[in-house]
Amino acid sequence: PSPIRGSSTPEIPDCAGVWAARRGMEHRVERDRPRALVNVGADIIDIESAGERQQRLECRHEALKSSHLHLKGAIRDSVYTAFQTHGQASAIMKDFADKSMATIAAWMLAQTSHAAISRFTGELTDHPRINILISRGIYAVLMTVFVPLLTWKLRKHALDANISIGADQIQLLKLCLPMFFAWGWKDFISAVINLKRVDQILWPEFLVAMGLTMVIGFIEVTPCFRQSVLRVHAGGAADTPCARMQIMPGSLGLAVGFAWNTVCSWASKELQAKCKAPLFVMMIQMVYFLFMGCVITSAYLKWYLAIQPGPGGRDGAAGDAGQAAGPAPDGAPSPPLADGENRSGRPQALGLHLNVDGEPDSTLGGRDPDADLARDLESRAPVFVNLESGRLAEYKSAMMHYENECVHQFGAVTMDALTFVYAWAQLDTVNSFFFTYLEGCTSAQTCSYQSNFGFALALTVSFAKLANVMKAERRLSGWNQASSALTTKAMSLNVGWVWINFCSAAISNAVESSGATVMFTHIVCACFSWLVISVMHRKFEIERRAWDRHVKHQTLNHGIGLAI
């Protein structure tokens, strides 16, 4: 069936065959009776021949009409497919560009603020690590206050309400604000982990990761957090700066992921430190990535199947794995994958619905994770009302439900963190191949900024092309769908991270060659980076609006506006 018309392509009548059959049947009749002739002036017209010619013309008319409809449908299908392909590629490129620009802006602001705050906190103690922890903590607290305030202040500025430069700047700021918060707390957690002594092995990282996961999971099941999410989603007078601040723990996925990455990658880092040959270092990293990729993908798929309603899911009786692996019902929630920029944190969506027995239902725009979370919380609101009642039966039932919610939310936070672990493993693998094996550097930061620039540019183009291909392909098994979604998500994050490595190498070279102070160099580079990002974002928005106008014009011409 045609995706535009919703019906089968009309068949073209076989006029030649119909005409030959009719002529053969009529020829036998004509042998036994005389032909009827009519004398009109000087012309003699065969009445039966005139009728046959009329039938021939009618048949050819129907054939031409069917051919025209078939050609028209093929053109519409071709235009629709071209728009869909171009729209998917544009959406991927915009997602990569937005995340890269927000990541670079967040890193620049964090490093510049740290350099400025360190001028005042550098002499507080005799321990440099403690001074760094204080500086990072101050910046994280400032972002916890200012990011929700600015987000609340800019909430009424629609993304497409205006096409001026100022409106595009506001849109860019709204894209970067969640990353400012996520990156600030990620640096703070990194400073906390770096306080460990050299003789302490793995336990500090594990305690920080586990403690952070449990604290965030507990916060997200509290009535205060859930009611704040509902108020923010409702908007209007219920959406207050205080409610915005109360939901900020849901955006700490990047920090939790960094903590768990230090735990998961500890063994491979220790083995790589003992190997001197770059080939062995690269092989160890690749084995680690393959192992962690299989573990995270399997855990993610099992988690997604476990939280589905019905037999074998979290909301039904325990069932076997075969029942849990059935096709996802229409409207089933997507897997809760979050990134560091999202406002509510969980549940999140990978951009497709996993259907382990069929093809993925992929959309360009995806669903609104805040709306999903709001509906989820509204369905569970009576539980917390029962907690305030004095009836013992309701209290016990509410406590059991509350315990299940805690376990579920701890698992959701862990799955969120493993997404970032997968992304860092992917980045470390490509870095190990290029910088360690090919360039002979110990890391990306120790290589030249020229090498980092070439690597970042090549990785951006190749990852964008690969993500576009993976989006277009159809995968039937749930494991392959989960693997593809995790890979695409990791590639979009790594594009921003490789450009951070280039910026770090370029700033280090500028400080060494110019003799300028670190704070002055970071301030200049931060201003220049924001200028470049603003120009690029403005250009992206201009091209996006031009493409939208082109699509609107072409769809009206071809009559496929409703389909688009």
Image: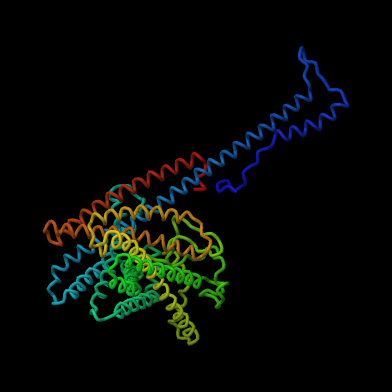
Q: Quadrant of residue 339?
A: bottom left
Q: Residue furthest top?
A: 42
Give coordinates of residue 45: x percent, y percent.
Answer: 77, 19
Residue 229 visible in image: no
Q: In this orientation, which residue lies closer to the viewer: 232 or 86?
A: 86
Q: In this orientation, which residue lies closer to the viewer: 559 or 502?
A: 502
- Compared across the picture, whether 110 is left or right of 255 comes to left
Give coordinates of residue 484: x percent, y percent.
Answer: 45, 61
Query: Which residue lies at the image location 24% right of the left edge and 81% below the top edge?
Result: 199
- Compared across the picture, whether 65 is left or right of 555 comes to right
Q: Residue furthest bottom?
A: 392
- Compared across the picture, whether 57 is left or right of 114 comes to right
Give coordinates of residue 555: x percent, y percent.
Answer: 48, 42
- 260 relative to 426, above or below: below
Counting every numbered tag in the picture gives 0
- 164 relative to 404, above or below: above
Colour basis: rainbow
Residue 455 visible in image: yes
Query: Which residue lies at the image location 26% right of the left edge and 72% below the top edge?
Result: 190
Q: Quadrant of residue 548?
A: top left
Q: Quadrant of residue 235?
A: bottom left
Q: In this orientation, which residue lies closer to the viewer: 32 or 405?
A: 32
Give coordinates of residue 2: x percent, y percent.
Answer: 58, 47
Q: Residue furthest right?
A: 32
Q: In this orientation, which residue lies closer to the viewer: 313 or 488?
A: 488
Query: Which residue lies at the image location 75% right of the left edge and 28% below the top edge?
Result: 52
- 481 relative to 532, above or below: below
